[in-house]
Amino acid sequence: MAENFDVIVIGAGPGGYVCALRAAQLGMKVGCVEKRATLGGTCLNIGCIPSKALLMSSENFHAVQHDFAEHGIDVDNIRLDLARMQARKGEVVSANVKGVEFLFKKNKVTWLKGAARIAAPGRVEVDGAEYEAKHIVIATGSESIPLPGVEVDEKRIVTSTGALELDRVPGRLVVIGGGYIGLELGSVWSRLGADVTVVEYLDRLVPGMDLEIGKTFERVLGKQGIKFRLSTKVTAAVADDAGVTLTVEPAAGGEAEQLQADVVLVAIGRRPFTAGIGVEDLGVATDERGRVTIDEHFATNVPGIYAIGDVVAGVMLAHKAEEEGVALAEILAGQAGHVNYGVIPGVVYTWPEVASIGKTEEQLKSDGIAYNVGKFPFAANGRARAMGSTDGFVKILADKRSDRILGAHIIGPDAGTLIAEIATAMEFGASAEDVARTCHAHPSLNEAVKEAALAVEGRALHI
Ligand SMILES: Cc1cc2nc3c(=O)[nH]c(=O)nc-3n(C[C@H](O)[C@H](O)[C@H](O)COP(=O)(O)OP(=O)(O)OC[C@H]3O[C@@H](n4cnc5c(N)ncnc54)[C@H](O)[C@@H]3O)c2cc1C
């Protein structure tokens, strides 16, 4: 007899494993299928965590070379031990994926090892073995989008997965795509000594983020030595023993030219991954971009089958997948699970960091919403000066009539942590004045958030 579960979750990324944990907390018998040798999905194995480990290491390497002298710390004979750096990254990943395995044991979630296929509603096959479940959750995540004319070998022409594994610093790295993955990994290799050029089809970086932030970001990364070719498209890339020859031309059409690189990173985005789970055979509806179609309760058109995370519409971010996992588990337990899609932060973990939440100025304009803007530069923040990290600013957008915070955009030191204050404020429906009247510790970077909130009413104090 096939083993019976209340819920079988397919995929143990942040969407799937968090859904499994929450469902188990709520008393359900849960199985989670994962075909990878370790739990944690893209995020823990080849995404968020290894990239942040290399960002930290490369930041340290860069700081010791360029910033320590200013602090009166002279260091001679600085050498890069890339093998050690990569090994540390592996240790960080390993600690995280083992942590999820521990959490599964603690919460009595059964890891069904292997590749899952949904044989029928209520029935899942995992490498030949059959299981039954009242509810099946598709949380199979996403994969890199390939670029026509550019064949990935994960050595010279790499996706983010290969870019995290390079065993030597490329002399010249061309990054195709000016989104957050390309800019984070471009920053890593630039800090370690590569000559980095980012080729972006659009006329701006990080599309979707506030334009003013995007322009500042381009300038700040430019100062760090990263070159940009905006409004440019790559039409071909040919790898040989000498490196990679890229053919690029203006996005709007025009004369083609060639760029030489030692390594090319293709980072033009990610697409949902549903191969092999039986979506087509079961008639599970997908949209024009291959995303599993769901209703507001994460239910697909096939009763008993649900989907969450990168495989459905919305921003492809780990914390969005996690929130959906929790909400779905609660709905399956008869509770009122809910995700507030208007309050999901997005962070680029370069230095300075870039963080964004809610509406951009461009969106407010096109929606015809009247707003006030409050801005405060880190150059006027004592803590940022003490840190020697004064690039960037905090920008808060508030409704003109009610003063309710509609969005916030930060480029600056630790922006990814600072944005959490605004996320909490927005969840409580706070006004800019609420943040402005809250006592913030001194000297802290958060004081720049308070000052930006004061600036919404034109009464910032320290500028
Ligand atoms: C380089 C990089 C950096 C990133 N950095 C960040 C960041 O800083 N912050 C952030 O929020 N997001 C980041 N992301 C995005 C983040 O990783 C994803 O949004 C997140 O992992 C999505 O979670 P998920 O659970 O939907 O899917 P995934 O994490 O993709 O997990 C899906 C899992 O399903 C498994 N699977 C698929 N099919 C089957 C099957 N048939 N049977 C069994 N198992 C199956 C896969 O093996 C995989 O482990 C980054 C991504 C990349 C690539």
Image (spheres, rainbow, N blue to C red):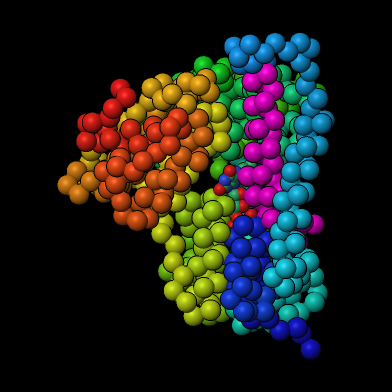
- Taking the image as shown, residue 267 lies to the left or right of residue 453, namely right
| Point 64% across, 16% down: residue | 68
Q: Quadrant of residue 214?
A: top left
Secondary structure mostly taken by the magenta-highlighted segment of the chain: helix
Q: Residue furthest bottom?
A: 1
Please say if 394 is above or below 419. above
Q: Residue furthest left?
A: 401
Please say if 228 is above or below 32. above
- Taking the image as shown, residue 360 lies to the left or right of residue 64, namely left
Please say if 176 is above or below 195. below
Seen from the viewer's position, the closer of residues 149 and 223 is 223
Quarter of the figure with the N terminus = bottom right
Q: Determine if the magenta segment contains residue 37.
A: yes
Residue 397 screen position, x and y as percent: 29, 40
The magenta segment is 35-64
Q: Quadrant of residue 284?
A: bottom right
Q: Is residue 427 visible?
A: yes
Residue 444 screen position, x and y as percent: 46, 32
| Point 63% across, 36% down: residue | 266
Residue 80 screen position, x and y as percent: 77, 21
| Point 43% across, 24% down: residue | 382
Q: Determine if the magenta segment contains residue 295.
A: no
Please say if 41 is above or below 70. below
Seen from the viewer's position, the closer of residues 58 and 32 is 58
Q: Quadrant of residue 53?
A: top right
Quarter of the figure with the C terminus = top left
Q: Is residue 362 visible?
A: no
